[in-house]
Image: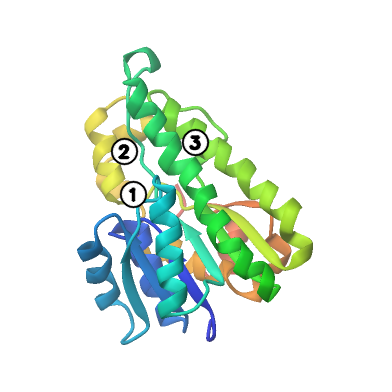
Amino acid sequence: MLDGEIALVTGAKGGIGAATAKALAEAGARVIVTARRLEDAEAIARECAEGRAIGLACNVADPDSVRAAVREATAIVGAPTILVNNAGTVQPIGLLHETDADAWAANINATLIGAAAMARAVLPAMLDQGRGTIVNLSSGAAHHAMEGWSAYCAAKAGLAMVTKSLALEYGARGIRAFGFAPGIVDTGMQVEIRASGINPVSQLPREKLAGVGDPALAIVYLCTAAADDLAGSELDIRKPEFRLRAGLPALPAT
């Protein structure tokens, strides 16, 4: 399905990032698994389809680390044709006046500026090839404020506009950009959210959270030509019409 594609996934230590790296490799792509710590990235790479993944250290909040990771990936595997911007953080959680200003800025740097830096680093080679796919992990928080998440909401709202900007600036040159909201998924981030108890999402019991499998498969779908007409859109995995198109099972009635 994705034979010949080279995919770079950020923040792939676990959760959606790790599941996506494995699904992309299973679909035939060569995968560059990145995480802040090299050992974490390499551990997930070893869990991917045999011989289809490598692990590299990359701190998306550090422009030098971003550039170095893309250079190394290109030298080892080839220039990425797919970028999945998954890295990000929900911290600091708290009312705005109670949050640390540096932590608030760090969220914007990792979740928003880091994603733009990754796109900036891979775009030249994508443009040279005349094709490329960038999937930015979005959220309902990009469009609806949530108490205690001012930094996260602001970062995801900004990232939604980066997606639209990528589509506007590069769509005619073969670059497809998507914003993808995976829903409320059982990940490490949700552990932090539940511990805060600050808003309705934090009150959801763990058994109500979705697994990582469907988001990973949906991202694989977005990386195929079948999703061409959706480029530039913000997509939500909970929408029945999208689930049908992506070949995902219908959600149970609530």
Residue 122, position as x, y percentages in the image: 55, 63
Identify the residue at the far right of this view.
Answer: 172
What residue do we see at 31% from left, 21% from top?
100
Quote the CA–CA distance across marks 2 and 1: 8 Å
Q: Which residue is mark 2?
A: 204
Q: Position of residue 252 (x, y in %)?
A: 44, 56
Task: Identify the amino acid type marked 1.
Answer: Leu
Give the residue number, with chain letter if any, for mark 3.
Answer: 155
Q: Earlier in the sequence, mark 2 or mark 3?
A: 3
156 above or below 124?
A: above
Between discs 3 and 1, the one toward the N terminus:
3
Q: Amino acid at mark 2?
A: Leu
**What whole-number distance in Å separates the C-alpha atoms at marks 3 and 1?**
23 Å
| Closer to viewer: mark 3 or mark 1 | 3
Residue at 30% across / 44% down in the picture?
189
In the image, what residue type sits under mark 3? Answer: Ala
In the rendering, which numbered label is found on residue 228? none
Q: Secondary structure at mark 1?
A: loop
